Image (cartoon, rainbow, N blue to C red):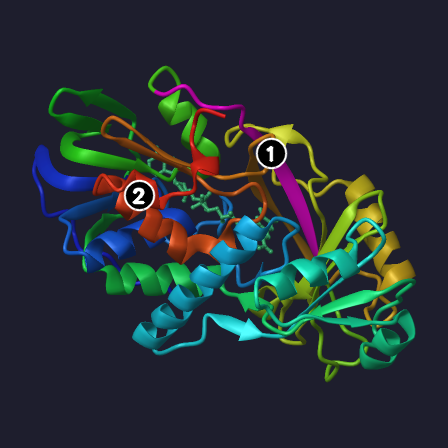
Amino acid sequence: MLPVPGKPAYGRRMDVEVAVVGAGLMGAATGYALGRRGTRTALFEARAPGHRAGSSHGSARIFRRVYPDPLYVELAGRARVLWQALEDAAGETLITPTGGIDHGADRDPVRLAAILRAAGVRAEVLTAQDAGSRWPGFVFDGPVLFHPEAGVLDPDRAIAAMLRLAGIRWYPDTAVLAVEPDADGVLLRLPDRTVRAGTAVIAAGAWLPRLLDGVVDLPRLTVTEQRVFHFPRRDPAARWPTFMHDEGKTMMYGLPAGRDGGPDGAVKVGAHFVGPQVSADTRTGVVDEETRQLVTGYVREWLPGLEPVPHNETTCLYTATDTEDFILDRVGPLVVCSTCSGHGAKFAPLIGELAADLCAGQADRVPSRFRLAR
Ligand SMILES: Cc1cc2nc3c(=O)[nH]c(=O)nc-3n(C[C@H](O)[C@H](O)[C@H](O)COP(=O)(O)OP(=O)(O)OC[C@H]3O[C@@H](n4cnc5c(N)ncnc54)[C@H](O)[C@@H]3O)c2cc1C
């Protein structure tokens, strides 16, 4: 359950140090980081708490440190420390450890293991036969990387915890219609009032291009509607790791789905970057038969531990840059936070800290790769 926010305690005009737009994982994390620093902050979210129209809803995202790029291995390690601190502050588990596996020729498990070990992260490479004995619900046809630090993070609970603990004012059902930078900072136009802020963090997910159109030059952002499916386990007691599997056609991923999977703990399975190009306004929420067949066929062939008929299915938006690197940068009084590209959730508390650093003028703390100019 998301916390119930306070009543809007302002009239027609409101002054804050920082305004945050969007209460998905990134906006909530930014509000949390700013609140802990004592920054007078107001956060505006267009929709109701817990809505499912963006990218952060539900009970399951993969936390992993496995990346072919050492930058993300390091950032995920820093994020993990912050997740732990958030869990301690919230008194609840937000990442359930499951371990994670990577396999398939295009995933290159042996190379990934070397990258992890070079960063001091535990990694084990198993033969297909040994992996098959350890995880009988899978089919393997080559080496398998096991990464014990991986787990399943719970975005709904994480957002609720961050908003509950942030100590900032936040306003659901309050859309920001326009942001207008000027010599004094930035003016935010709401339906019935204006907000004057020194800095505004725009963490508006798939809506970000619309809000910043004509205000900031953005690199290309492609929004796609992704479909995910929850498949029942044949053996409800079987333990499932998170997984990434790439044979060169489509990268498939999966993870225990938590509450989204229903009482019997179904496993969420998806095809990475398979979905129509849409905008936040034109997405349909419809699960198409072609993707259903693709994912069901995959489960039938590679995941014999699951019933190949989904228990339920849903959609979610990816907002991606061409390189899948994040955008986190400041232009005058605006901090642009577009950190999805289908893999941002695991970094959320770190993104919040870095966005707060940008608000404080500490641009040097943010990886240069995340700059707008690329
Ligand atoms: C299917 C799927 C699977 C994923 N799997 C993983 C995974 O396994 N591991 C991982 O690390 N990451 C994963 N991700 C990525 C991760 O979920 C995203 O990086 C993250 O949720 C992005 O959060 P966000 O806050 O940027 O966007 P959002 O969650 O979309 O939040 C943006 C918010 O801004 C609000 N908003 C928009 N416009 C306005 C406005 N004008 N005024 C006020 N509010 C506004 C919206 O209502 C919304 O609530 C996955 C994403 C999807 C879709």
Mark 1 sits on what residue? 323
Residue 313: quadrant of the picture = bottom right
- Range covered by the magenta-colored residues: 216-229
Position of 128 compared to 168: left or right?
A: right
Few, some or many residues within 10 Å of mark 2 (<14, 14–19, 20+) = few
Position of 242 compared to 345: left or right?
A: right
Whole-Å distance between the Cαs marked 1 and 2? 33 Å
Residue, x 66% and y 73% (percent of image)?
A: 265
Is-magenta flag for residue 319?
Answer: no
In the image, residue 347 sits, relative to residue 249, either above or below, namely: below
Residue, x 21% and y 29% (percent of image)?
A: 188
Q: Locate residue 143, reporting x and y percent.
A: 85, 65
Q: Amino acid at mark 1?
A: Thr
Q: Locate residue 325, reporting x and y percent.
A: 54, 38
- The mark that comes first in sequence, 1 or 2, is 2
Q: Amino acid at mark 2?
A: Asp
In the image, residue 123 sits, relative to residue 110, either above or below, namely: below
